[in-house]
Amino acid sequence: MFVTFEGPEGAGKSTVLAEVARRFREAGQEVVTTREPGAGEFGARIREILLHGDDMTPRAELFLFLADRAQHVASVIRPALESGSWVLCDRYIDSTFVYQAVTRGLDADFVNRANAFATEALVPDQTFLFDLDPVVGLARVTKKDRLDGQPINFHRSVRQGFLQLAQQGADRWKIVDASQPLADVVEEVWARIRP
Ligand code: T5A
C-alpha cells in the first residue's frame, strides 16, 4: 500500500506519519517512511536548492520537484512496494499540482502529464489531506524556508487547492481536521489507514 500525506505548511503531516509508522512496526508490518522533496543524497541536494536557495522561476521550481520525484519513485518507492512493504510518503504528486499549478499558475494539464511521466503513473492508494488554516499552520513552523515565507494569500490558495482536489478527487482522499489536538489527529489517521 502506498499512502501519501498532504496539506499546507505545519499541518502535522510528518509528526503523524512518524507515529503511524511506529505503530505499524510495533504490529510487525514492514513500512518505509519517506518524503518529498529530499529523499536520499540526490534528493537532499535538490531540497537544499528548492527550500534554501535563491528565488527561481515557477517553471524551474516545477522541474526540480519533478526531478526529485522521478529519482525517488525509481530508487525508493517502487522497490519498497515491490518488496511488499507499506510506503508512507510526506508529500507527493498532489503537492505539485496544488503548489505549482493551482497556486503558481502553471498549466494544470501539463503538470498532471509531467507528474505521470516522472512517476511512470504511480498513484497513491490512499491520500490523507491534513486540512488547517494556514495562519495556524505557519505559527507552528519554527524554522521558515523559502516556501513558508511566501505571502499569506499564497498559503490560502494552497489550502483551497488541496480541498478542491480532495473533494473532486477519487476515493483515495481522506480529509482530516488538523486543528484537533495532535493525539486526536493520530487516532483518526490510524483508524482510517488500516485496510
Ligand atoms: N512543495 C513540495 C511544492 O511546492 N511542490 C511539491 O511538489 C512538493 C513535494 C516542502 C515545501 O515544498 C513545497 C511544499 C512545502 O512548502 P517541507 O519542509 O518538507 O517543505 O514542508 P512541510 O511538508 O510543509 O513540512 P512542515 O514541517 O512545515 O509541515 P508538517 O510536516 O505538516 O508539520 P509537522 O509534523 O512538522 O508539525 C509542525 C509542528 O506542529 C506541531 C508539531 O509538533 C511540530 O512542532 N504539531 C501540532 N501542534 C498542535 N496540534 C497539532 N495537531 C499538531 N500537529 C503537529
Image: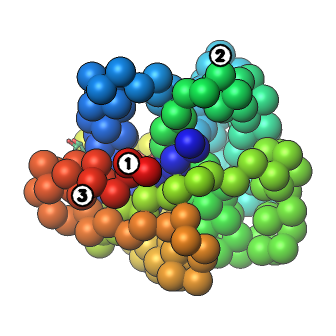
Q: Is residue 81 above or below residue 115?
A: above
Please state if 34 lies on the left or on the right of 12 as rendered.
Answer: right
Cα separation, mark 1 vs mark 2, equals: 31 Å
Q: Do the residues labelled 1 and 2 touch (CB within 8 Å)?
A: no
Residue receiving disc 3:
188
Looking at this view, is 123 or 101 the one in front?
123
Residue receiving disc 2:
41
Please report the residue visible at 58 percent of the width from the left and 83 percent of the height from the top. Answer: 168
Q: Which amino acid does label 3 sit on?
A: Glu
**Which residue lies most toward the top here?**
41
Q: What residue type is labelled 2?
A: Glu
Q: Which amino acid does label 1 sit on?
A: Arg
Please report the residue visible at 24 percent of the width from the left and 58 percent of the height from the top. Answer: 188
Picture coordinates of residue 80, whole percent (x, y): 63, 25
Residue receiving disc 1:
194
Query: Mark 3 or mark 2: which comes first in sequence?
Result: 2
Q: Is residue 177 above or below residue 80?
A: below
Q: Do the residues labelled 3 and 2 touch (CB within 8 Å)?
A: no
Picture coordinates of residue 109, whole percent (x, y): 84, 74
**Residue 173 seen:** yes
Cα separation, mark 3 vs mark 1, equals: 11 Å
Query: Mark 1 or mark 2: which comes first in sequence?
Result: 2
Q: Image quadrant for the N terminus?
A: top right
**Residue 6 seen:** no
Q: Is mark 3 on a helix, strand or loop?
A: helix
Picture coordinates of residue 165, whole percent (x, y): 57, 76
Q: Is mark 1 on a helix, strand or loop?
A: loop
Query: Mark 3 or mark 1: which comes first in sequence?
Result: 3
Name the disc covering residue 129, or none. none
